[in-house]
């Protein structure tokens, strides 16, 4: 049985969040997708984001908290419990590119 090749996925901040809205890009192989994002206040803890894929009507609410409390409304997350939106935002935070928290 042949192994499935996993495409390398990278994220790049195109416009910082303080530009309102921010923009990041996710590259998977030759496919490149752009997303608007805005940080939202979260009444239940963690950091909340609204993510909109450019060129579509797909809008996702993402909440980053502990591993058990991280969520996204996309089908990938709903099916398998992880997705590129969560991974992209976590990577940008880890790199220090989204460290400013929104207060409103």
Image (cartoon, rainbow, N blue to C red):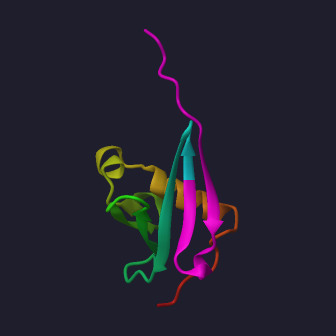
Specify the segment rendered in magenta: 1-25
Q: Specify the farthest residue to the bottom.
A: 104
Viewer-proximal residue among 35 and 81? 35
Q: Specify the farthest residue to the front.
A: 55
| Image vertical order of residue 36 relative to residue 20, above or below | above
| Relative to 15, 73 lies left or right | left
Viewer-proximal residue among 70 and 86? 86
The answer to whether residue 58 is magenta is: no
Residue 102, position as x, y percentages in the image: 53, 84
Residue 20, position as x, y percentages in the image: 54, 81
| Image vertical order of residue 68 relative to residue 82, above or below | below
Residue drawn at x 35%, y 51% as measured from the top left: 77
Residue drawn at x 61%, y 57% as measured from the top left: 91
Q: Is residue 46 visible?
A: no
Residue 61, position as x, y percentages in the image: 36, 68
Residue 19, position as x, y percentages in the image: 60, 80
The number of callouts visible is 0
Residue drawn at x 43%, y 9% as measured from the top left: 1
Residue drawn at x 46%, y 90% as measured from the top left: 104
The answer to whether residue 20 is magenta is: yes
């Amino acid at each position: 049985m042949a192994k499935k090749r996993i495409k390398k996925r990278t994220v790049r901040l195109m416009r910082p969040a303080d530009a309102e809205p921010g923009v990041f890009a996710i590259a998977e192989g030759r496919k490149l997708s752009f997303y608007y994002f805005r940080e939202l206040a979260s009444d239940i803890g963690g950091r909340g984001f609204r993510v909109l894929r450019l060129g579509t009507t797909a809008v996702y609410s993402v909440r980053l908290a502990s591993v058990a409390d991280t969520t996204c409304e996309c089908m990938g997350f709903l099916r398998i419990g992880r997705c590129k939106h969560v991974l992209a935002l976590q990577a940008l935070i880890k790199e220090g590119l989204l460290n400013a928290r929104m207060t409103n």
